[in-house]
Image (cartoon, rainbow, N blue to C red):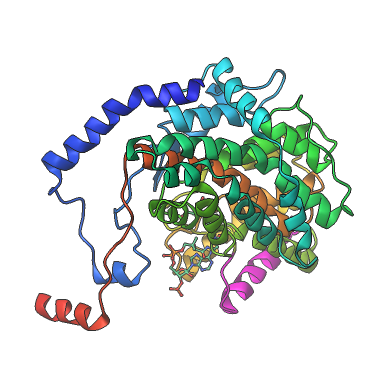
């Protein structure tokens, strides 16, 4: 497999680079930690490393050094399509360089070979009550697959530490291959009377998802490619990435680790914000129609949300201090293909109004929209109106990023994660000594 060979070829150099850095410069300080940070969710504490993506507060995400517009331009695309193969993105994450079309197709073909979802996964999904949240179904499905783990089996057979990454790669390819079918199955089971559309090997990974969802507009294939690219990775400190990394650091396999990450993604301050945001937009619409001539009602609605103690979903970020480029990419897609769509126009109008309000309120450090502020309105346009499904799509995409990170964490021998905690009395003592 090209992927395995390309990773293997880089390992001696990477391992030497990291070992040298730690051995020769291990005592150099990266930063200091304040009491506010200890109590404040470790915001901005530099304690993780990844070479797959980096979020610059004023620029946004770069994947392996490339901005989103650069990637949309440079990654190989299916013939006649505007958005790239996700197989090419996975190649970039794993290998570190842009793939040729053949290399992107190599990953797509690996996924085709490994895509068959065992029947017991569907049985497990169906066994849950009909009102279970789609994220519960999705998380369970990923966890159910754990019995397939090659990493867990080989670990117990005594595989050497420097080879851990190989079964981690196998597991990750096996898992990611199945995600579009599992997700679409959940959608069709819950919302389309279990009228399941089988996968079609003629599609690429993301195109097949669009096909299995039953959306007939061909443009939705491109939106799926864009969506899965944008949500895949956001450096390592966000809840889903950090949880996956933490769990995998105990040498749990990717099925355990990714399902834990998905549980974190299901929180309203993280991935679930996309569903919350669509709910909020629909409430706005109910209150003030299309609002296009009535910014004042929209302003009032936003203030009411804040005054009732709630957050405005889709706005603010722990790291970013400008409009999320993942928001911009989706805004541009909507402007290009359906600028007149009601909900899309409303999401765009909220962007005109809400940042000023958040600034006026003066609490949020970042008044700008994040990825979730608009993603739902694009899905809504193509008929995916069941907003509690949106976080499942985020999850499909996020496993691309977190699994690539888990493979590299094993390849570089990253240890079990175990930060130190203190008591409040200890912090008070530290504070007293400092003053
Ligand atoms: N609406 C209202 N208040 C906000 C918002 C917002 N959109 N964003 C931040 N604040 C408040 C925040 O609740 C906090 O209030 P308090 O002091 O009363 O606890 C204050 O502003 C300071 O928070 P920050 O330091 O700016 O934000 P933090 O880093 O703690 O949290 C988020 C980041 C993303 C959790 C936060 O901005 C938020 O809750 N946003 C809305 C939910 C959302 O869109 N989440 C999705 C993030 C992206 N994703 O996919 O994960
Ligand atoms: C993400 O994509 O994970 C979110 O933007 C949250 C984050 O980066 O903190």
| Residue 119, placed above or below residue 229 | below
Q: Give how far across and how far down residue 201 sits, in percent.
A: 75, 27
| Residue 375, placed above or below residue 94 | below
| Residue 275, placed above or below residue 83 | below
Q: Is residue 294 magenta?
A: yes
The residue that appears at 47% across and 53% down in the rendered structure is 244
Q: Give how far across and how far down residue 377 sits, in percent.
A: 71, 50
Magenta stretch bounds: 291-312
Q: On the rendered image, what quadrant is the C terminus found in?
A: bottom left
Q: Give how far across and how far down residue 71 sits, in percent.
A: 52, 28
Q: Residue furthest bottom?
A: 425
User: Relative to residue 198, is residue 92 drawn left or right?
Assistant: left
The residue that appears at 43% across and 39% down in the rendered structure is 407
User: Relative to residue 271, is residue 28 drawn left or right?
Assistant: left
Q: Is residue 28 magenta?
A: no
**In the figure, residue 406 lies in which quadrant?**
top left
Query: Residue 206: in sight, yes or no?
Result: yes
- Between residue 223 and residue 398, name the one nearer to us: 398
Q: Give how far across and how far down residue 283 sits, in percent.
A: 74, 67
The residue that appears at 32% across and 28% down in the rendered structure is 11
């Amino acid at each position: 497999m090209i992927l395995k060979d390309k990773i293997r070829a880089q390992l001696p150099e990477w391992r030497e680079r990291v070992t040298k850095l730690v051995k020769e410069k291990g005592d150099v300080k990266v930063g200091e930690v304040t009491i506010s940070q200890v109590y404040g969710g470790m915001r901005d504490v530099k304690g993780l490393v990844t070479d797959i993506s980096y979020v610059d507060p004023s620029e946004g995400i770069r994947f392996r050094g490339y901005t989103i517009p650069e990637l949309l331009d440079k990654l190989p695309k299916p013939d006649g399509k505007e958005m790239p193969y996700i197989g090419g993105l996975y190649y970039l994450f794993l290998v570190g360089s842009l793939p040729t079309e053949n290399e992107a197709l190599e990953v797509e073909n690996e996924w085709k070979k490994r895509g068959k979802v065992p029947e017991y996964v569907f049985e497990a999904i169906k066994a849950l009550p009909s009102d279970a949240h789609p994220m519960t179904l999705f998380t369970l499905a990923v966890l159910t697959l754990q019995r397939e783990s090659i990493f867990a089996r080989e670990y117990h057979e005594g595989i050497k530490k420097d080879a851990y990454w190989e079964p981690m790669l196998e597991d990750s390819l096996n898992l990611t291959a199945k995600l579009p079918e599992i997700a679409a199955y959940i959608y069709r089971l819950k919302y389309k009377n279990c009228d399941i559309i089988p996968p079609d090997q003629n599609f690429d990974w993301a195109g097949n998802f669009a096909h299995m969802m039953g959306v007939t507009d061909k443009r939705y294939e491109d939106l799926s490619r864009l969506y899965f690219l944008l949500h895949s990775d956001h450096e390592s400190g966000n809840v889903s990435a950090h949880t996956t990394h933490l769990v995998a650091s105990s040498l749990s396999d990717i099925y355990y680790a990714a399902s834990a990450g998905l549980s974190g993604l299901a929180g309203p301050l993280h991935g679930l914000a996309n569903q919350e945001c669509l709910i909020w937009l629909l409430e706005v619409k109910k209150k003030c129609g299309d609002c296009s001539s009535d910014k004042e009602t929209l302003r009032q609605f936003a203030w009411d949300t804040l005054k009732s103690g709630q957050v405005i979903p889709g706005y603010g970020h722990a790291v970013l201090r400008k409009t999320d480029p993942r928001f911009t990419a989706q805004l541009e897609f909507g402007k290009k293909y359906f600028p007149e769509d009601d909900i899309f126009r409303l999401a765009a109008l909220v962007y005109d109004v809400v940042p000023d309000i958040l600034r006026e309120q003066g609490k949020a450090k970042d008044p700008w929209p994040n990825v979730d502020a608009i993603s739902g309105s694009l899905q809504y346009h193509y008929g995916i109106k069941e907003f509690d499904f949106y976080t499942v799509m985020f999850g499909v995409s996020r496993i691309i990023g977190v699994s690539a990170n888990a493979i590299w964490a094993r390849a570089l021998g990253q240890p079990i994660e175990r930060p130190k905690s203190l008591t409040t009395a200890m912090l008070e003592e530290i504070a007293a000594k400092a003053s």
